């Protein structure tokens, strides 16, 4: 029993469920666990095995892998570009289209379909943001269906509120 536990600690993705859970908690990947289906243990083994294997690619490659495991064919990662002529107003003019008058930024947009569970996504969003390096700024969005053929009208109103902190610390 002790020998198998030692072996499981050397290759945790092949170990018992308790070993996989321990190592996924240690690396902050346990939030990807889903309790609603019977594939949760298998999914966590695959995610953790790829977490270890993609150590040098823990950027968009691993993020894309995790999104494909959690939301297959319902996600897209886009690099964002900014206008060169309006560079002094960065990051106000970000877009996902590539042109010669734009420069590549360190920002990405993670776009998910509207059919994803929004409550689950709100819990996963901080972890998804940590899967990219510190210099990359992710933006998580949900792609809502088009309202062109629906008779929908939108109005926006707002109120300006000023807040100040007068504490000396």
Image (tube, rainbow, N blue to C red):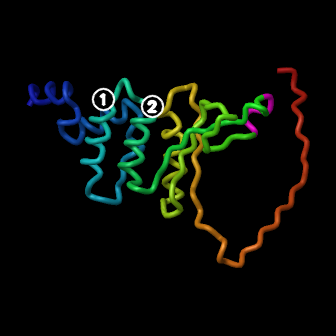
Res 155 quadrant in image? bottom right
Front-lying residue, 20 or 134: 134
Q: Main secondary structure of the magenta part?
A: loop
Residue 88, label in figure = none
Query: Residue tagged by mark 1?
Result: 52
In the picture as drawn, the residue positioned furthest to the front comes out as 100
Residue 59, label in figure = 2
Query: What SS does tag 1 mark?
Result: helix
Vertical position of residue 122 compared to residue 101: above or below = below
Front-lying residue, 62 or 16: 62
Q: Residue at x 10, y 30 (%)?
A: 4
Quadrant in which the C terminus is drawn: top right
Residue bounds of the magenta highlight: 88-92
Residue 157 covered by magenta stretch: no
**Left or right of 143 on screen, residue 58:** left
Res 63 quadrant in image? top left
Q: Residue at x 48, y 54 (%)?
A: 120
Front-lying residue, 84 or 19: 84
């Amino acid at each position: 029993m002790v020998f198998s536990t030692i072996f499981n600690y050397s290759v945790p993705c092949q170990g018992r469920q308790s070993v996989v859970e321990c190592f996924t908690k240690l690396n902050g990947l346990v939030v990807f666990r889903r309790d609603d289906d019977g594939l949760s243990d298998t999914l966590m083994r695959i995610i953790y095995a790829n977490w270890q294997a993609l150590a040098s690619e823990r950027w968009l490659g691993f993020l894309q892998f995790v999104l494909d495991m959690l939301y297959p064919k319902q996600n897209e990662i886009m690099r964002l570009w900014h206008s060169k002529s309006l560079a002094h107003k960065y990051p106000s003019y970000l877009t996902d289209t590539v042109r010669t008058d734009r420069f590549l930024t360190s920002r990405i947009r993670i776009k998910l379909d509207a059919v994803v569970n929004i409550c689950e996504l709100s819990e996963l969003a901080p972890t998804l943001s940590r899967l990219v390096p510190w210099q990359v700024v992710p933006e998580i969005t949900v792609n809502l269906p088009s309202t062109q053929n629906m008779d929908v009208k939108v109005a926006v109103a707002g109120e300006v509120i000023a807040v100040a902190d007068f504490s000396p610390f």
